[in-house]
Image: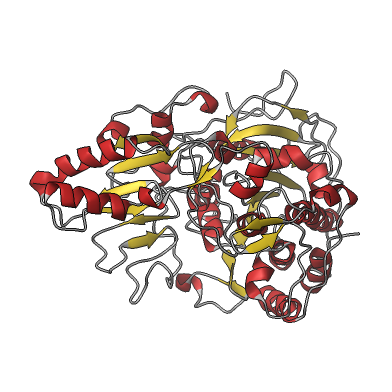
Amino acid sequence: MKALFAAVLLASVAAVAPAGAQQAPAPSAPVPTAKPKLIVAISVDQFSADLFAQYRTRYTDGLARLQQGVVFPSGYQSHAATETCPGHSTILTGMRPAHTGIIANSWLDQRVGRPDKTVYCAEDERAPGSDHDKYAPSDLHLRVATLGDMMKRTDPATRVVAVAGKDRAAIMMGGHNTDQMWFWATDRFITLPSRSTAPVPAVVTRANGAVGKLLAAPQAALPLPGYCKPLAQPITVGTQTIGTGQFQRAGGDVKSFRASPALDGAVFALAAGMIQDMKLGQGKATDLIAIGASATDYVGHALGTQGSEMCIQMAQLDQTIGAFLARLDEWGVDYEVMLTADHGAHDMTERQQQRAMPMEEHASPTNAAKLVGAAIGQSLGIAGPVLLGSESDIYVADSVPKARRAQVLAEAKRRYLAMPQVAAAFSREEIAATPFARTPPEAWTLLERARASYDAERSGDLMVMLRPRVTTIVNPAPFYVETHGSPWDYDRRVPILFWRKGMAGFEQPLSVETVDIAPTLAATIGLPVSGLDGRCLDLDASAADTCPK
């Protein structure tokens, strides 16, 4: 059956086909030569290449259809800091985090004048009262244009829409000049404060009403496909036992709703409603809708990647995407789909240890910048704080005298490299002096991966990388048993798929990068682009070439 949430919500917000819609003619060429009228760019948060490989033969609906197109199973988010915000910033800009400015989900800025000094990637820290946890969402920190921005610059008639389960996904894929941008926030879809003066579109009101009813009601267990049953094995992680769940939920439980297939259903329903109400793909110009499907990430963090929960999530996502694409088919929209992910993931330590990986471990609390800095301060006679940390970025505190900063940094590097869980520690000078890599991404050194994530204004004074199979989670907790963000390939590798009606598909197993997506899509609509980190991928398996000469 179709995914429960997609069926309910699509019926609520996209029940009527646009007037006059016609079925797109079936092209005879191996790759359609006419420009598509709508680009549908989908990011499935935390959809690793490993997860795609594990379930690709199980898909029967939307994801099965996309595999009939051009498949790159070994795409790379090639940078070191494989987090949601930097990953999304690469997908439709064609630029790596070193150029987008989005080096991580958060970074430290000692100039902001607030105690935590932490700046969120999608925050306008200039807004009164804004902090890392309670902030005004903004596109302030994205330094480059997205594909949608480029399209609108060339043809103002282009409409650009972004809908996502996270603000950072919508912002980093949609860009600076979207016509509509909506993302999930606790219990409803909202938009940027800077764009909230216009009336709320009717489709958003309908979607929030439909989702509100769904959220208020309890959710019974979702179907467990037969191939999922062997994965339904309990695992104790911290104080909780997970691994056998089927997404039962009490009414009003917003956190469990978010970490379930329901969130993707809501996002795709709103996306369909936007296409319907705005008549996207029916104008003279090509339109673009960016869709951030965030539930896979929330499910992974809360429940891991190898239990019954993720298996159900994969089945439901497949059906949700299928229901969404079926609507576009009914409306006769000539559309092109691209699907990828912002990063990969690695299953929880506890389950990995039970499955032939006894070397898996949690990060030691002694790795914390605060503790390392305190030890350095005591050793060198410097009053604290000495070091500040944000994920892999370590900053020398501004309170450290300038004359002693180099000494502190050298001592910090020495101490980190002596830690058994640390693979590398690079100073900002080492990273900045490293040329950008020109080799395939799987061959990049750790220093080259760090270079792709480095920004002179936002990055730390030291980048510390843990060894493979060491998770940054020190103590697992509810909704946080697994994570990502490492420079290792299980976090870097993601699938990249392109599909359009009439396209003759093929598979290329060699590596490509997510920064190749924007120039590839640009080529399909004849949009000239230059100066990007990525390259155009030829989507024609024959001697013909879809990329500009």
Pick whichever, 104 or 30, lies toward us: 104
Quadrant of the image containing the C terminus: top right
Pick whichever, 331 or 370, lies toward us: 370
Q: Is residue 439 above or below residue 355?
A: above
- Quadrant position of residue 129: bottom left
Residue at 72%, 68% (x, y): give it. Answer: 277
- Quadrant position of residue 506: top right
Pick whichever, 417 or 527, lies toward us: 417
Image spot of residue 58 (x, y percent) = 84, 43
Pick whichever, 474 or 495, lies toward us: 474
Residue 403 left/right relative to 317: left
Quadrant of the image containing the N terminus: bottom right
Residue at 66%, 29% (x, y): give it. Answer: 546
Q: Is residue 32 above or below residue 373?
A: above
Residue at 66%, 57% (x, y): give it. Answer: 236
Residue 233 left/right relative to 388: right
Residue at 39%, 46% (x, y): give it. Answer: 392
Image spot of residue 78 (x, y percent) = 51, 35
- Quadrant position of residue 545: top right
